[in-house]
Amino acid sequence: MSPFYSTRSETDPARLMALYDLVTGAKERVREHYEFHSRRRGEGAFFRSFVVSCQGRDVGLLEYGKHHQLPAPHEAWLELNLDSQCAWNFEAARGLLMCSEEDLSRHGFRSFHTETRDTRLHPLLRDMKWNEVMEIVDTSLDLRSMLDLPFPALSEGCTVVSLPTLRERYGDKVAEHIQPLIREITADTPGFAEVALSLSVERIRDSLQDQGSYFLPEAFFFLEKDGELIGVHQLISSEPGQVSAAVTGILASHRRRGHMRALKLHGLAWSARAGFKSFRSNNEKNNPMLALNLSLGFRETSRSIVFHKSVD
């Protein structure tokens, strides 16, 4: 007999974090993810989390609802994570996804997004008319042997400044000064063009105030050249001892001059000196940032596929 999956609703962030970590091993986003959605639930945002059980054991999580990287009101995130060791039932998994899609549709969502490393789900999603959008490559770098890594020499006229420095300089107008840079770089990142459209000054200001424990203002780096902000490299820490990159890039007009490599090396040197043990990154497989990371010593750890589905 094929195994049957059952679900129960769960809202406690600690229990959700523990199960997500157990099922996926993706510690790099656990704390940030659940801190964010715990706050959003408190504000009335639509987001559901269900524990999936099979044969008397908790084996996964089914989550869906509004996500901060999907700005349009009709867009939703859906994620099904199952323990790789649990008994697999194609039709039972289909039932979980179908119920999720129906619930999202009832609440007015018409565009669904998901990302999964689980190769068992890939043919199921394709069979359910989800379209493959892009492949993401996860990489990692051990920082423990990089304590003596020097801060890089910068091109003439260039300086690395942090968010606290810009706050001292611009006060409550800092969002106005960094918004054009962040919006342009986000728009140029594969898969984030629509996100960039929503990056108004107000949203940037709100994001600087809505700070979870993962936020590292002293590691929100900007590259300045002759007084102009031309690059950004934001580091966050979603798990003790581990750092990862958020918005990162150089304006197109200033590329191919070594600026991005220097800014990345600055982030690595800072991270090692700050006591972090590892640096995690994920990039679309054709993104030049992936090649840069690999040239700096990062090693591939896993791959995932992003899928999308629209409903009438």
Image: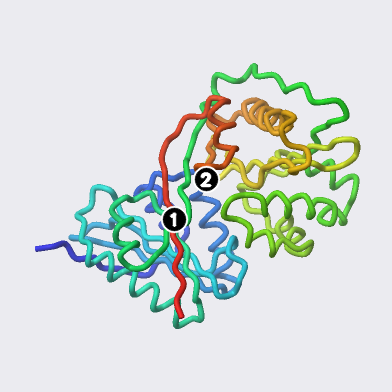
Label 2 Cα neighbours within 10 Å, binned few <14 / some 14-19 / many ≥20: many
Q: Amino acid at mark 2?
A: Glu
Reply above or below: 100 against 187: below
Compare marks 2 and 1 and give the one earlier in the sequence. Answer: 1
> What residue is disc 2 on?
284
Question: What residue sits right under mark 1 in the picture?
Answer: 115
Q: Residue at x 16, y 62 (%)?
A: 3
Where the N terminus falls, by quadrant? bottom left
Q: What colouring does the structure picture have? A: rainbow
**Crowd rating for badge 1 (residues with CA inside 10 Å; few <14, some 14–19, many 20+):** many
For badge 1, the amino acid type reads: Glu
Q: Disc 2 to disc 1, how far (Cα)?
A: 12 Å
Q: Hey, which quadrant is residue 81 in on the image?
A: bottom left
Under circle 1, the secondary element is strand
Residue 51: x %, y % from top left: 34, 63
Q: Residue at left 33%, top 51%?
A: 118
- Tell me where residue 108 appears, x and y as whole percent: 51, 81
Residue 277 appears left or right of 251: left
Rendering coords of residue 254 (x, y %): 78, 38
Residue situated furthest left in the rendering? 1
Residue drawn at x 73%, y 22% is: 152
| Residue 235 in the image, given as x and y percentages of width and height | 65, 41
Disc ID at residue 248: none
| Mark in front: 2 vs 1 | 2
Judge by depth and name the residue closer to the eye, 69 or 35: 69
What element does badge 2 sit on?
strand
Looking at the picture, does residue 240 appear above or below residue 98?
above
Residue drawn at x 41%, y 78% is: 103
Number of disc labels: 2
- The relative height of residue 190 versus residue 8 in the rendered view (above or below) is above
The quadrant where residue 276 appears: top right
